[in-house]
Amino acid sequence: MQLTLWTYEGPPHVGAMRVAAAMHGLHYVLHAPQGDTYADLLFTMIERRDTRPPVTYTTFQARDLGADTAELFKSAAREAYERFSPQAMIVGASCTAELLQDDPGGLAKALDLPCPVIALELPAYQKKENWGASETFYRLVRGLAGARRDRPSRDRKSCNILGPTSLGFRCRDDVREIAKLLATLGVEVNVVAPLGASPKDLTRLGDADFNVLLYPEIGLAAAQWLERAHGQPFTRSIPLGVGATRDFIAEVARMAEINPATALETNDSRLPWYSRSVDSTYLTGKRVFIFGDATHAIAAARIAQDELGFEVVGLGTYAREFARDVREAAARYGVEALVTDDYLDVEAKVAELQPELVLGTQMERHIAKRLGLPCAVISAPVHVQDFPARYSPHMGFEGANVIFDTWVHPLMMGLEEHLLTMFRDDVEFHDGAAPSHLGEEQEPRRPTSAAVVSDIVLAWADDAEKELKKIPFFVRGKARRNTEKFAAERGLATITVETLYDAKAHFAR
């Protein structure tokens, strides 16, 4: 076990809560000690839900351990049904309560409640949050979808959308965008699950002709079971980016036996146009580091290299269950995949590569901020700012527009900063000038002109400092460090313009 400040995933019972909170008519009875109710804050604070998750905790205390904790669970389960009258219940234990071995599934079965009760076995010390969400959804689907049956006759093909949950990355808006795209194709949406579904809706999953899998980390196991048990194929293309959206449309069209032309003609993404325009030359070849869940990281690498002309210098994931997929993707870009759930490993890699753009989770946002690098968030885990009130999908053609804005703006703002820096000697923009809206009585800022490297004090000549400021800010730090290292190794006490260019030539070899 390792103590950590941040973690990419919580324990598996938090994944089960994400499924329960996404649905209605479902209630989760969680055998847990007092204090494990912290998970409620993830939904009310980060996702800004106006209700608590549908979870009842046993909340046993230390003094209860000498008594019958099993009886506490049975009382909590019985009272939860009487109070909430759910269509179905799921029962399980948190990581701490798992050590008691009270068997919530067996205890709930003995109560003989008048609704389906699905027991969850979530090994808290071997698995994590996404696996817990996937296993919970799989158990619900398997327990409620029923046996294979004849599908109702329809004029149009229908599908289920699988995978979106609470606390997922842009799930609410992605579902809306993909539902609109499917309607353009003439495909009906039968059930969306878990997000917005009820246990009764899950009993209708078998009525669809095929399944649209948007989030494999959550929905893959359920989609595979539905394929085996109900003969429903499922899509493999994830519609993130223009190219992948076109692939998705073609795949859905084959399954629905329809012409995809109408949906393809609705492409109003500005990303392809801009990436071919003269204005985009500033972006070409930008070095980008990508880290997140496997689905979003792999898709981001394709968008970055194929659609925006970036260079992928790093690709990784914290989702070990999908490590093979990420390694295969990384090999296509000539890089070695970083598979880790330790943010310190990620930070070390970013510091080593010094990319010009970081695409990642909220962890990478903090890492990039400390290293002075531009960053855009592309994957959960995320914080409140990545649950916008506005419509902001990442999937489909409109999602490609959002991705374009989200990724390009940090770089374009970097260009603006660079231009401002170039004109610092201007009467309005020089380093000693106060912000115009604050007047002229502010203390002028003084540039740093000396550094200590390996106990050697290095001074920057004024003309060298001025020349350094012509370098864009997002690579200026690396240029400064390389030059200081170059000077220290050669015993130079003062860095001149000649030293700066000698260092540049040395590190360019």
Image: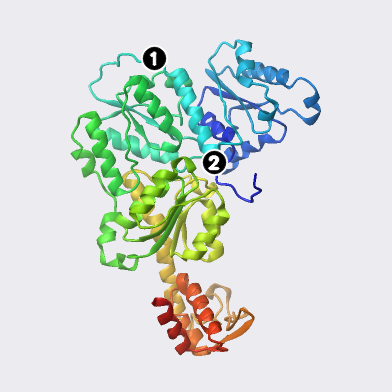
Q: Amino acid at mark 2?
A: Glu
Q: Nearer the viewer, residue 292 or 453?
A: 453
Q: Establish if 406 lies above or below 175.
A: below
Q: Position of residue 273 (x, y in %)?
A: 25, 57
Neighbor class of circle 1 (other Cα within 10 Å; few <14, some 14-19, many 20+) is few
Between label 1 and label 2, give the one nearer the viewer: 1
Asked whether, in this view, residue 257 is left or right of residue 214, the answer is left
Q: Establish if 314 lies above or below 220.
A: below
Neighbor class of circle 2 (other Cα within 10 Å; few <14, some 14-19, many 20+) is some
The quadrant the N terminus occupies is top right
Residue at the image point whose x is 43% and y is 53% from the top: 337
Taking the image as drawn, is residue 391 in sight?
A: no
Taking the image as drawn, is residue 473 in sight?
A: yes
Asked whether, in this view, residue 75 is left or right of residue 290, the answer is right
The image quarter in which residue 259 lies = top left
Q: How many marks?
A: 2
Q: Element at badge 1?
A: loop
The image quarter in which residue 189 lies = top left
Work out whether mark 1 precedes mark 2 in sequence or the reverse, and give the earlier one. Answer: 2
Which residue, given by chain and number where applicable, does mark 1 sit on? 147
Which residue, given by chain and number where applicable, does mark 2 sit on? 47
Residue at the image point whose x is 52% and y is 89% from the top: 462
**CA distance for labels 1 and 2:** 36 Å
Q: Position of residue 383 (x, y in %)?
A: 54, 48
